[in-house]
Amino acid sequence: MQEKHISSAFDRDLETLQALIMKMGGLVEDSIRDATDALINRDEELAQKVRRADKAIDALEEEVNQEAARVIALRAPVAGDLRTVLTVMKISANLERCGDYAKNMAKRTSVLVQMPNVDGASHAIRRMARDVDLMLKDALDAYIARDDGLASEVRERDSDIDQMYNTLFREFLTHMMEDPRNITACMHLHFIAKNMERMGDHVTSIAEQVIYLVTGELPDDPRNKSDKTSYDLPEGDA
């Protein structure tokens, strides 16, 4: 009877953690879409909203960590149960980084609204952001359904994001060489594209954690990275 009571309490703890993760994921999805809309529509007010929303995402990550620590200390989970708690913590950390990158996009948008548009950039960036957002949705769906097949599919799609980034990188270089007046705007747009490429990496990490949760093992095959550019954005630039 005591074991059943402990099991029921642990199940409730896991439900609480899962609810926090889904709430956090929803806020990150909103931030990605809002940051993209702010850039495309040159909406500085919406960009400010994204920057403010990051505080709520950070607070949820802290809540997840505190709740997970409480569960570990109180329930002393082992094997699969411990794996579930650790997976939740790692997923929340990846979501928090995605939120940071959305915030950084919004920061650069506040600068870009003062500059002329760069031809063709809006459509390409919107497509890239849409695909990252869909990857995140599917990764979270895979987590809820414990679907390692869907998680593996999400992992494979990261190479598409890398290819989009590579294409944008070359396009921005071309714009800068053709007209030096485009250099500042294109540098900001490049970093925005890099932010989205990094989001794709973190979403892929979420998918890998789902695979670990379901199978007990992380994928051992190397991720197919297609980002071959020489420029890189430090993790701290968010």
Image (cartoon, rainbow, N blue to C red):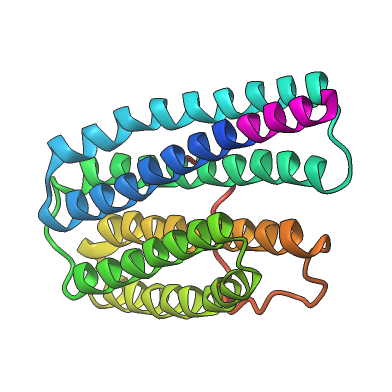
Numbered-mark total:
0
125 relative position to 69: left or right: left
Start and end of the magenta stretch?
1-13
The answer to which of 119 and 197 lies nearer the viewer is: 197
Residue 47 position by quadrant? top left
User: Which quadrant of the structure image shows residue 48?
Assistant: top left
| Quadrant of the frame with the N terminus | top right
Query: Residue 79 at what x, y percent from top left?
Result: 88, 46
* Residue 42 screen position, x and y as percent: 12, 50
Q: Is residue 20 above or below residue 222?
A: above
What predominant SS class does the magenta segment belong to? helix
Closest to the observer, 156 or 40: 156
Percent position of residue 188, x then y: 33, 54
Q: Residue at x 30, y 46 (%)?
A: 30
Q: Residue at x 25, y 55 (%)?
A: 36
Q: Residue 78: which quarter of the image?
A: top right
